[in-house]
Amino acid sequence: MTGFLALLDLTRSGFTAPGFAIFTDLVTGWVCAPGRRTITNMITVADPAGRRAHDAYHRFVRDGAWSMNRLWQALATHLIATFSPTGVVEIACDDTLFHREGRNVEGAGVFRDAVRSTVRRVVYARGLNLVVITLTIRPPWGGQPVAVPVNVRVHKKNDPITTIAHAAAMITELAAWLPERTFHLCADGAYATLAGTDLPRTQLTSRIRRDAALYEPAPPPTGKRGRPRTKGERLPTPTGLAEKTTAKDWATVEVDVRGHTMQRQVWTRDVLWYTVNKTDLVRLVIVRDPDRIEPDDYFFTTDPHATGAQVATRYATRWAIEVCFRDVKQDLGGQNPQSWKRRGPERAAALSLWLHATIWCWYLQTHPTGRTWTPRPWYRTKSTPSFLDALAALRRVLWSQRITTMSRSTAEEPKITAALLDTLAYAA
């Protein structure tokens, strides 16, 4: 049994025996299939002899008696125990749009497409709006952190549950799976209001509005009649506070930005952001480029002990979740499965993200040095593997097992097989 099949075996209890066999074939077919990752294309690779009716795979996705939540629990607990066994668990949150055309796709709607939208022009597209929680892993080869999904929910059009509520529910669920662990969540400004929710054992780092209404802490009760004050004196906005600072107020620190160390100036102050959290102070952190080429960044954290450098570094790691979304869509074809009805679209989208995390888990454990790609003379500076390299490494293993068992041994076999595997491994 390969390490990848051992990872799939962690989920066996969530299926019936026939269901687990279909699940294993479907997932391995998804990994190995070239071209579009439609369910039919996966079947062509996983079950070329037609041992099962093709409808069995489609029914399994849309109506099968299995729970995606149990798959997430098994994988999330394994990932955190393996890659974050001690200390604070670093997680991130964001939402992404999986494009799905057609009015009959269950759960799909028209949403803002963040990838194609700009400050001046908003682009809308039809698809599934997924709220995703990822675990941040710092790979042994260094460089940019890796984000692997650990939970996903679909936010539907006119859904009474907001994306913020979906994120809070998943974090609460993750905390219940790991009752002895503490978490640190990093999210963009759209999820800043999570600072006002009672997330179990979780601190938040996010962007703060440049025009946020900030206040001094509430003064102590005076003992007079009437309700005590809930906030202190009004402060300038974050941009106003930055303008009032002098050169000596800034501290020069080193910040880790996607694996690169950069010098930045930081200024911190504890303030009350009353709109978001009416009782607890947050730590405002303003980050400035010493050369003043880039504009100032404004962050906040609910961690009262965090330094300015830690806040800037933590937020910089959030970019890994954007890389995760790109890899799932481009390299795993997360938007391709042709499933329209009932739970099919939601499950297929979630499985693509689950598979992304499983492949990274296999690769990090099997290839800790990361040196698996084929060196090319026109690309000599590459030093760290991408998700496509991890996917290619797993494809080589799975295809090699299939080819060597089906083919007859000849003198030319190693040379032919190596070239064939290299082509299949990186097939689009």
Image (cartoon, rainbow, N blue to C red):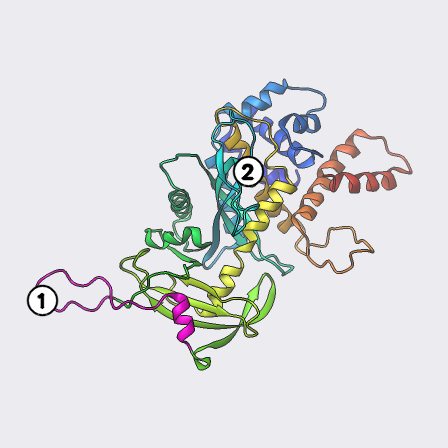
Q: CA distance from mark 2 to mark 1?
A: 57 Å
| Residue 246 picture quarter | bottom left
Q: Which of the image's four quarters has the N terminus? A: top right
Q: Residue at x 90, y 38 (%)?
A: 412
Residue type at the position of mark 1: Lys
Q: Which mark is residue 98?
A: 2
**Which range of residues does the magenta coloring cover?**
218-245
Q: Secondary structure at mark 1?
A: loop
**370 lies above or below 219:** above
Horizontal and vertical percent position of residue 87: 46, 59
Q: Main secondary structure of the magenta part?
A: loop
Residue at the outermost right position: 411
Horizontal and vertical percent position of residue 51: 67, 19
Residue wearing tag 1: 224
Q: Which of 116 and 269 lies nearest the eye of the viewer?
A: 116
Horizontal and vertical percent position of residue 303: 39, 63
